[in-house]
Amino acid sequence: MALINESHPEEIILLGFADQPWIELSLFIILLITYPMAIMGNMSIILVSTLDSSLHSPMYFFLTNLSFLDICLTTSIVPQMLINLGSTMKAISYVGCVVQLYFFSMMGSTECLLLALLSFDRYVAICRPLHYTLIMNQRVCILLASIVWLGGITYAVSEVTTTLQLPLCGNNKLDHLVCETPVLLKSACGEKEVNEFIISVVCIFIVAVPLCLILASYASIGHAVLNIKSSEGRKKAFGTCSSHLIVVLLFYGPTISMYLQPPSSITKDQPKFMALFYGVVTPTANPFIYTLRNKDVKGALRNLVRHVFIFK
């Protein structure tokens, strides 16, 4: 972690939408509503996947990891955003900014890899159904999840550490809602070309490669589904896969627009809206996408609610 010195101020001012108070008020109200929804929705997925024995399968094990990730991702930025949006003081300590930077990058990069892992699980389930239980056994699932988490942590440490090596040269104002790598890199002074190149290369491996694997998996899945003779079987396969594809589009679209272009070409308000999208909108929408389109999860949720009321 970078030391606080002349090039790193004691606090960072996150300007946000300070010049547009009506946007800040609207955003404050929206976050007050969506943040509890994101926490409750993802906690519900974790609870039903853990408590309902019918959901003890690799797909729901990975969905539990995704829900935990989404809780951590949105929690790493929303509380601080609410504090800043609800007051005239929009400061965060430099140490707090660094911690937020590490956590936000770690959870975001891990989610990139986890979505690729979910697509691989669906590929094996649909294209290799007879070998599914053999390939995706408990030991393999835990190993794959561990690799995903380790990959996300490694990426975050390398990306953020590289960014923090650049001095801010007295500039303690970021035109953003959160501490995020592209904006910090854009605000830093000195020679940034090497840092931008390193981060771009690392981003290709953490964003573009998993996305290519997802697209390849779903090309194979689409071919296999079309060959299923049962219309009910095709419908179920499409239903499961379409939920995952919607989540992939919601997460990867904004991520690509932020991380696979040079920081110097990023427009003024683009980082704010993109961070809100993959840091707030996607974690809030994921539980609804997976539950509203999944009969097993809806049934498990109904059973859980029924047991709670019976117990009371």
Image (tube, rainbow, N blue to C red):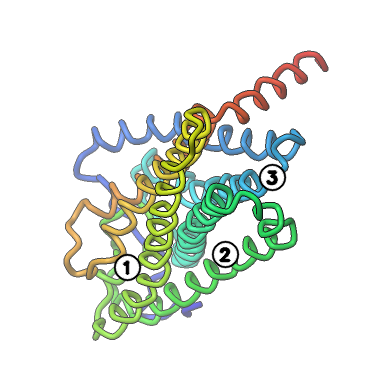
Find residue 245 and report its image quarter: top left
* 53 horizontally vs 105: left or right: right
Residue identifier under label 2: 148
- Label 2–label 3 contact, CB within 8 A: no
What type is the residue that disc 2 sits on? Val
Find residue 14 and report its image quarter: bottom left
What type is the residue that disc 3 sits on? Ser
Dot 2 or dot 3, earlier in sequence: 3
**Mark 3 surroundings: few (<14), some (14-19) or many (≥20) residues within 10 A:** some
Residue identifier under label 1: 184
Q: Residue at x 70, y 52 (%)?
A: 133
What type is the residue that disc 1 sits on? Leu
Residue 36 visible to an observer of this rendering: no
Depth check, front residue: 257 or 273: 257
> Where residue 224 sits: x, y (%)?
46, 47
Q: CA distance from mark 2 to mark 1?
A: 26 Å
Q: Check disc 1 and report its element: helix, strand or loop.
A: helix
> Where residue 242 sits: x, y (%)?
42, 39
* 83 horizontally vs 118: left or right: left
Q: Residue at x 43, y 54 (%)?
A: 220
Depth check, front residue: 114 or 69: 114
* 158 horizontally vs 18: left or right: right
Depth check, front residue: 125 or 10: 125
